[in-house]
Amino acid sequence: MDAQRDEWSDRRQIHDVVLRYCRGIDRLDFTLVRSAYHPDAIDHHTGFDGSVDEYIAWVEPKLRARRGGTMHIVANHLVELLGDTAISETYGTSVHWGEPADDPRVNFTSGVRFVDHMARRDGRWAIAERWAVREWTRSDAGRLKPKEAAGPSGSRDADDPLLRLQRKLRGTEAGS
């Protein structure tokens, strides 16, 4: 039972690494993005190959300059455990939007696979090397429509509903 529990725990921790990366990119939380990688990790993205520090230095200004956002949607996730290393393959969709709304370089959706060499070091699973494989891309230029009514909206700052809830439940709201 303990071996089964350890395997389940390893798979859950590896999946959490993938989700932390996606949340970090989408919320512009680059500390969270960095936490998904080991310090000496290598990343391969469309238009980029290099260390995790170089990757963050490359991607952060691109995402901060964009008036809009990204949403990474995780689908199939398969892990092959190999002791303290693992092969993790995650299928997903990456949606990008911004200004100008008719620019296909800013407004597009891609089918992606994250092919990750995961490693457990000092009890912590993280990415040792990542290949962000772009399987397809379609233009969404001119297709974004405004919300049909008032309601919660996401943001990439302290006003995002997630960050407000975290502050509230952790007791870090002003006056708590």
Image (cartoon, rainbow, N blue to C red):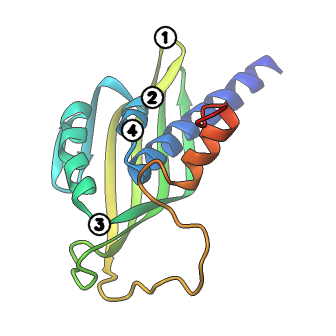
* Mark 1 / mark 3, whichever is N-terminal: 3
Q: Quadrant of the N terminus?
A: top right
Q: Amino acid at mark 2?
A: Ala
Give the label, 4 or 2, closer to the camera: 4
In which image quadrant can residue 56 be found?
top left
Instruction: Work out whether residue 145 or residue 139 is closer to the camera in this orientation and state it.
Output: 145
Where residue 21 appears, as percent x and y from the top left, is: 44, 43
State the image coordinates of residue 175 (x, y, percent, origin top left): 63, 34
> Which badge, 3 or 2, is on the more N-terminal residue?
3
Dot in front, 1 or 4? 4
The residue carrying pointer 4 sits among few (fewer than 14), some (14 to 19) or many (20 or more) residues within 10 Å by Cα, namely: many
> For the residue labelled by badge 3, is the local secondary structure a helix, a strand or a loop?
loop
Which mark is on residue 122? 1
Residue tagged 2: 126
Gap between marks 2 and 1 measured at Cα: 11 Å
Q: Which residue is mark 4?
A: 33
Quarter the C terminus occupies: top right
Label 1 and label 4: CA atoms lie apart by 19 Å
Left or right: residue 35 compared with residue 100: right
The residue that disc 3 covers is 67
